[in-house]
Image (spheres, rainbow, N blue to C red):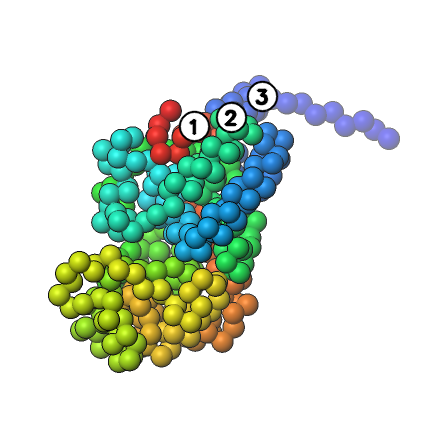
Amino acid sequence: MNSLNFTISPLWSITFVVLSILLLVHPSYGSSLTSSFYEKTCPNALKTIQQAIQKAVSNESRMAASLIRLHFHDCFVQGCDASILLDAQATSTSERNAFQNIGSLRGYEVVDSVKVEVEKLCPGIVSCADILAVTARDASVIAGGPSWTVMLGRRDSTTANRTLAESDLPLSTSTLDEQISIFSNKGLNTREMVALTGSHTLGQAQCSHYRERIYNGTQIDATFAQNLQKNCTRSGQNDSSNLAPFDLVTPNSFDNNYFKNLLVKKGLLPSDQILFSGGATDNIVVEYSKDASKFNTDFADAMVKMGNISPLTGSEGVIRKICSKNN
């Protein structure tokens, strides 16, 4: 057989070298999240996180909802970079003080304690942003919800942005169009928005967020409203922080009762009930109310997609030693 001779031009040689350098030094080239990111550098990290979350949720069942919400509120501001965890001493623009977060977002101390345990295993290796992503998955599973493969390799931001938090996070009074727009701006479609909002199958909300609905709302079951009024007065004196579960039926179980409640006008927040109010999401709510398996699958897929919103990877960001503070 005749041999084949290949000649590499000087121009191609130069191009190859330049591309190789870019892959090494530029974080947007070749950097991606992977499920095996800590397989060699911290192989017991995921097991350690899971054990810590199991203990935290066992101590307080409400914590499952809080940890899922933390991951959501992180990813919607600057991407999934653990900026939500930086406290006011770390930055004057702490996202914790945004009006969607202050006084209601919780679980910070759980994440801090998980970080301490992981640091003992492998100092400076596992990011706080990845811990948030893993804790959200573990919290779902512990509460009886779906599992998913968490993609890893995020790094931590050194900054937070309260202004962005207040503009990019949904409100309890957000209209359907506003919610669709907020999620769309993050690359999440309408079905994914409904699935992610279904995390309200767990957790509780403060009276201040549902008071207006139970006294002046039109799409609300009368008996449901009256029962809530017992713990949330019209005057609002000293009871604004009183809590009510999103799902009165199975408040600590991840299931599809949240959607069943919407069908009978028993959504706790205005932004919950708006998902079933004659609009574009009605059919999705009906589907999930009938098919828990479909809801679980869509929720897991949406969580994976949400976890991939603008992560810092490669040489971007840092690995914070303490999640609430900069190094």
At 86% from the left edge and 30% from the top edge, which residue is drawn?
A: 1
274 displayed left or right of 303: left
Kind of residue sitting beneath label 1: Lys
Indicate the position of residue 262 as horizontal and vertical percent values.
36, 74
Q: Earlier in the sequence, mark 1 or mark 3?
A: 3
- In this figure, which residue is indicated by the disc labeled 3? 13
Q: In the structure shown, which secondary structural element does the residue marked by tag 1 occupy?
A: loop
User: Is 18 positioned to the left or the right of 175 in the image?
Assistant: right
Q: Which residue is mark 1?
A: 321
In three-dimensional space, the C-alpha distance between marks 1 and 3, rounded to whole angstroms, equals 42 Å
Q: Position of residue 91 (x, y in %)?
A: 26, 32
Residue drawn at point x = 41 percent, y = 56 percent? 62
> Do residues under tags 2 and 1 come within 8 Å of each other at their CB atoms?
yes
The mark lying in front, picked from 1 and 3, is 1
Instruction: For label 1, count other residues whose C-alpha is less than 10 Å away and answer few (under 14), some (14-19) or many (20+).
Output: some
Residue at point 54%, 55% (across, down): 141
What crowding class fits label 2: few (fewer than 14 Cα within 10 Å), some (14-19), or many (20 or more)? some
